[in-house]
Image (cartoon, grey):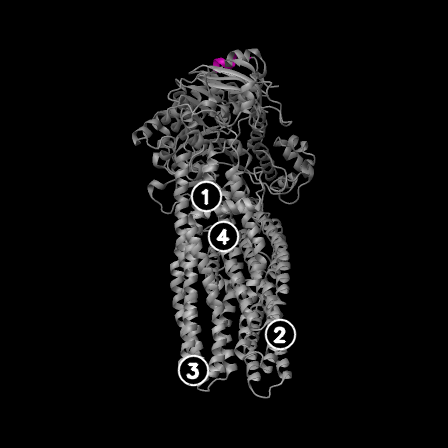
Amino acid sequence: MGFVLDGLEAESYDRTYSDRALVRRIAAYFRPHARTMALVAGMVVLASLTETVIPFVISRGIDALAGNPTAQLALALGGVVLVLGSLGWLFNFIRQSFSARAVGAVVLALREDAFAAVMQRDLSFYDQYASGRIVSRVTSDTQDFSTVVTLTIDLMSQFLLVLIISIMLFAIDSTLALLVLAVTPIVFIAALSFRRVARWATQRGQRATAEVNSVIQETVSGIAVAKSFRQEAAIYEDFRATNRLAYRVRLMRGLVLNTIFPTLDVISGIATALVIYYGGQRALAGTLSTGEWFLFVQTLGIFLFPLTSIASFWSQFQQGLSASERVFALIDAEPKVIQTGREPVERIAGRITFEHVQFSYNREARDLRLEASTREPAASLKPLDSSPWVLPDFSLDIPAGQTIAVVGHTGAGKSSLARLIMRFYEFQGGRVLIDGRDIRTLDLGQYRRKLGLVPQVPFLFAGTVAENIRYGRPDAADGEVELAALKLGGGEWIQDLPQGLQTDVGERGARLSLGQRQLVALARVLLQGPSIFILDEATASVDPFTEAQIQEGLDVVMRARTSIVIAHRLWTVRHADRIIVMKSGRIIEEGTHQSLLRQGGHYAELYNTYFRHQSLEYIEQVGAYAEE
Amino acid sequence: MLVSAREFTVAGEYVYDRRSPVRWIISHILRYPWLPVLTLLGNICSSALYNGGSILIGRAFDAVATPGARAAELLGLALLVLAARCGVGLFGIAQISAVQVLAERLERDAREELYISLLGKSQTFHNRQQVGDIMARATNDVQQLNLMISPGVMLIVDAGMFTIVPLIGIATVRVELLIVPLLFLLCFVFALRGYSRALNPVSGALREQFGMINSRLAEAISGIEVVKGYAQEKEEQRRFSENARGYRDLFVQEGRIKARYLPLLLFGIMFGLGFGHALLLFLNGALTIGQVVAFMGLLGVLRFPTFISLFSFSLVQLGIAGAERILALINDRTELDENAAGVAQAIDGEIVFEDVSFAYRDQGPKTKDESKRLESGNDTSDNGTPPSLVVSPSSLVLKDITFTAKPGETVAIVGQTGSGKTTLTKLVNRIYDATAGRVLIDGVDVRDWSMQSLRSQISTIEQDIFLFSRTIGENIAFGAPGSATRQQIEQAARAAQAHDFIMAFPDGYDTVVGERGVTLSGGQRQRIAIARAFMTDPRILVLDDSTSAIDSATEDEIQRAMRRIMKGRTTLLITHRISQIRWADRILVLRRGALVAQGSHDELMATSEAYRRIFARYERDEVASQQSPVGSRQ
C-alpha cells in the first residue's frame, strides 16, 4: 500500500478533467488495440464461467451419481472437472498475455507522448517544477495508470463471477440465495471501514519511516564527527529514541493492516453456518437436493472473496484515474515560448539587439494579436500580478564579434539576458533582434545551433569525455573532437584525466571536478563552432592550475565571436571589450574596467564585493593578517 | 565467537550469532522465543480449525443423508462450524499479531545492532565508508528483513499448514485419497522452480530497465538547458523511446510468463482427478456422500498454497540478501591497531614524509552488486576517491613524496582534483597507512604512536563540514573535552569570526542548524568548524579549504579566522585561494600523485613553470589595480 501517498502533490499546471473526458481519452489510447481488448474481454467471460461451472458440475454430479451409480459416470464427471480446470487456466493465460501486450503498448504510447511534451516545454516550466516530479509523472504515473487497466480487467472478471454465481444460486433456491446476499453488505462495510483505518495507519507509518530515515541519515553522516569528538553515546541516544518510536508506530500499522483477513474469516463463517443450518433443513424437507446444498456451501467462498476486492476497487480506480489525469495535464500544459515563424537560419554574424524588452519570469506570455495592432511595446502590457519586472525596459546593442561582460549583484537580471538570447523564456514586451531579424520569427532548432552556452555548473551527461564534447554534433569525427580538446590550454587538461578523452565522467559529470567540467563544456562549444558564445561563470572556486587552463581556453573560444559573459572573475572583466553594469534590470553604467573603476560608481562597489580579493594587491595584503 | 575490537559498547547488549546471514536471522528470531512459538501455535490451531470446519460440513451432509435425522443435530453442527470459524479468526489474529511484533522487532533490533556496531567501528572505517552505502543498509536492507518475516515467512508457514493439515484431514477421511494430492505436490514443486527460474531474470531486467528510463529521463531534464541549447530534443526523444520500448518488450514478456503459471493448471487437473477418484470410492461404498463433500472441500484448500508460494519465497530470498549486506558491514574489521602501548606524549608539530607512496588496497565490506548501487552523494573532489582493488604501480595515488614541515609551519598543498592532496593529509592521522616509506611526527613513525594520543592532537576541518541538528552553541562545544561554558564557546566563536553572524540570528547561539533548522552558508559552516577546532586546541591541523566561494565580503573574515587557527600549529592546508598559497611557509605542488615542486613562494616562482603560470596572469594586470582608487580596506 506504499503507493497510497506517492505522487499526490499537485502542480499548478494540473487541471481537472471530467470523468467522461478522461475515460474517452484513455479509450483513444486503447483504440488501436480494440481487437486484443475484445479478445481479453471474451476470455474474462469464459474464465469466469468455467470457474463457476466447476462446483455446479460437482454438485449435479453428486446428485446424478445417486440416481445412476456407474463407474463411467464417475470417471466422466472427474474428466469434465479436469477439462474445465485446464480450460480455465488456458483462458486466463490468453487473457493475461494479451492484456499485457495491449497495456504495454498503451503505456509506451503514453510515455512517448508525455516525454515529447516535456521536451517541448520552455525553461520556465522546469524552473517551476521539480525535476523529480516531472520524472515521476512520465514514468511512475504512467505505470500506475497501467495497473488500473489490469485492475479493471480483474474487477470485471470478479464482478462477472459474483453475478453468475448469484444467478445460479437464485435459480436453485431463491430464499437461500437471499440469505447469502444478506451477508454482502457486512462484507462491504467491513472492507470499506478497514480501508479508512488502513490508510490512516499507513500514513502514520510512512511518516515514522521518513523520520527514522532522516535521523539515521544525520547520525550516520555525523558518526565520523561524533567519533573524532568522542560523542558516540549522545548520538546513540538520539537514534535509539527515534528507532523505538518508529517501531511502535509501524507495529500499530502492521497490526491494523493484518486484521482484515481474520475478520473476513469470521464473516464467511457466519454465512457458512447459516447456509448449513437452513440448507440442511431444506434438504431434510426434500426441497433441496444434497448436491445443490453442497453447491451453496462451496460457492460461498468463491462468492465472498471477490466482494472484498470489489469494495476496495473504487478508491484504487480513482487513484489510477488521477494518475492518468496528471499525465494528461503534463501533456496538455501550454508552452509559453511562442514562435511566430520558422525562418531558416543559415549563417549568423552575431549582432544582438534588445529593443525596449520587458521581461518577467512569473507573467503570462503576451497576447500577440493585441500587440500587432498597437505598436507601443512598453505600455502595451499591464502587469498581471504584483511581481516586478526583471527587465522593465531594456535596450542594448551588441555588435558582432564583441566580448561583453555583464556584472551586477544577484537578481540584477544578468542571467535573464543570456536566457532571452537563448530564447529559453518568453518576454512580454519589446523586441530581440539577431542580425536585425526578430528572434521570434526564427527556426528555433537552427538558431540555437548557432549559439554556444556554458552554464555556471556545466552539465555533463553520463558517458565519456569525448561523448560529451560531441553532444552538440553527434556526427563529428574523432579527430575533430580531439582537435577541439587540444585547442584548450594545449590539451594539458586531457593528460590529467585518468583515461584521457575516454574517461568516464560519471553521473552528471560527478567524477570530474568543476573546473574539468568547464573545460569539457568549452570544448563542446569549440566543436560546435557557434557564432554567439554565452558563458555564465562559476561562482565556486577552481584549483589555480585548472583556472589558468580555463582562462587560456576562454581566450580561444571568445576570439572572433560575439561573447556574452556573466562575469565573476576579475580576469574576465579585465579582458572584456565592454562591461555592462546592471542593477534591477537596468544598465546603470557601461565602459571598460579602467574607465568604470575611475568613475567610482556601482562598478567600484561591485569590484569591492566580488573581484577585489582576486587581485594581486589583495593577495599581497593578506600577508599582513598573519601579524595581527 | 570472534569479537572485534570496538570503540563503543552498550551495556547489556544482546549477542547475536553473526557467522552467517541465516544463522543471524535465526538468532534474532530466537531472541523472543515465545513469538515464533505463538505464531506456530496460532497457525496450527487456526488451520486445524479451518479444516475441522470442512469435516464438520461433511458430517452435516451425512446427517441429512441418514434417515431419521433431526433438525436439532443440524443446528448443533451449524453452530460448531460457526464456532470453528470464529476460532480460525481469533487464532489468526493471535498469529498475525505475533508475527507482526516479531517482524517489527527484527527490523528495530537489526537496525540498532547495526548502529551500535557502526559506532564501534574505528574512525578509519568511517572515513572510508560512503554514507549513502551505510544509509542503504540501515534503511532498505533492514526493512527487507521486516518484509521477509511479515508477510514472507508468515505466508510460508500458512502455506505449509494449509498443505499439511488438509492432507492429514484427507488421510482421516481415507488414506487412499492422498494419492492424487501427493502426486500433485510433487509436480508442483518442480513447476514452481521452473516458473521462478523463468521469471526472475525477466523481472530483474524489467526493474533495471525501469531504473534506466528513470535515470536517463532525470538526466535529460536536469540537463535541459544543454539539450535545448544544442537543439538535441529529437535525439533525446529517440533515446527515450528506445528505452521505453525495451521496457514494453520486457513487460509483455513478463506478462506472458506470469500468465503461464503452471501450478494453477496442475491444480485444475488435480481437482478433476481427485473428484473422479472420490466418486469411484463412493461407488465402491468406501466413502459416504458426506466424505466426498468433505474431501472436495479439503482439496479446494490446496489452491491457497498453490497461489501464494512464489510471492513468499522471493521475499525470503530478498531478506536473506539484505541480511548478508548488513552482516558484511557489521562483521567488517578494520585492520587498525589501537597501539595503546605506543608513544603518547604532547606533539611538538614536526611532520616528515620520507619517500611515501600510497595505493588503495582492496577493502571494505562489499557484496557483488554494491559498488554500482551508490553513485550518488559523493561529489567530485578528491576526498572520497573510490578504492581500487589491486595494487599495481600505475594505481599509486601518491608516489615518493618527501617533505618536511617544521613545527608551526603552514604547508599549502596545491594541485588538481585527483592529484592526491586529500590522501596525503590522511596519512598523517593514520586514516590510511603509507604503502611504502614513512610518515614521522616529531621524529617518530606514526605507526609507533598511540592512536589515541596521535589523533587527539590532530584536528581535521573537512571540505564538507558536518553540523548536527542541534544548536550552534552545542555544535561548537562538541569539540570540548567535558563541558564548555558559554563564555568559552563565545570566545572560540569570536576567534573564528563567527560571533557576529551567530548573534544576527534571532536565537543567537541557541539557533538550531542542520536539516531541521537554519541552513548555513558554506562560509558560515566553515567558521563554525574553525570555532569547534579552537575548542579542541590541536597541535596539528588539517584544513581542507578547496570549496571556497568567490566573495570578497566573507573572504576577509575567513582569512582572519584561518590565520588565527593556524597560528602556532603545524597546518596542512588544501586550498584554492591564491592568497593562502602566496603566504604559506611552504607550498607542495602535486600532479597525479607526484610532488612536482615544493618550496616557498619565491622559490617556486623561480623554479616551477606551472606555478609561475598561475601568477603570470596576475602580474600582467598589476598596473591596472595600482591605478584604482578603491581596493583599500576600511
- Label 4 lies in what chain? A
Residues beneath discs 3 and 4 located on the same chain: no
- Name the N-terminal-most of marks 2 and 4: 4
The span picked out in magenta is B622-628
Residue B209 magenta-highlighted: no
A188 is higher (above) or lower (below) than A483: below
Instruction: Please state which of residues B122 and B428 is positioned toward the viewer in this rendering.
Output: B122
- The percent position of residue A532, horizontal first and vertical second, equals 42, 21
Alpha-carbon span between mark 2 and mark 3: 31 Å
Q: Main secondary structure of the magenta part?
A: helix
Alpha-carbon span between mark 2 and mark 1: 52 Å
Residues beneath discs 2 and 3 located on the same chain: no
In the picture as drawn, the residue positioned furthest to the bottom comes out as: B68
Mark 2 in CB contact with mark 3 (< 8 angstroms):
no
Residues beneath discs 4 and 1 located on the same chain: yes
Q: Quadrant of residue B244?
A: top left
Alpha-carbon span between mark 1 and mark 3: 58 Å
- The percent position of residue B376, horizontal first and vertical second, equals 47, 43
4 or 1: mark nearer the eye: 4
Dot 2 corresponds to which residue? A274
Dot 1 corresponds to which residue? A111
Dot 4 corresponds to which residue? A149
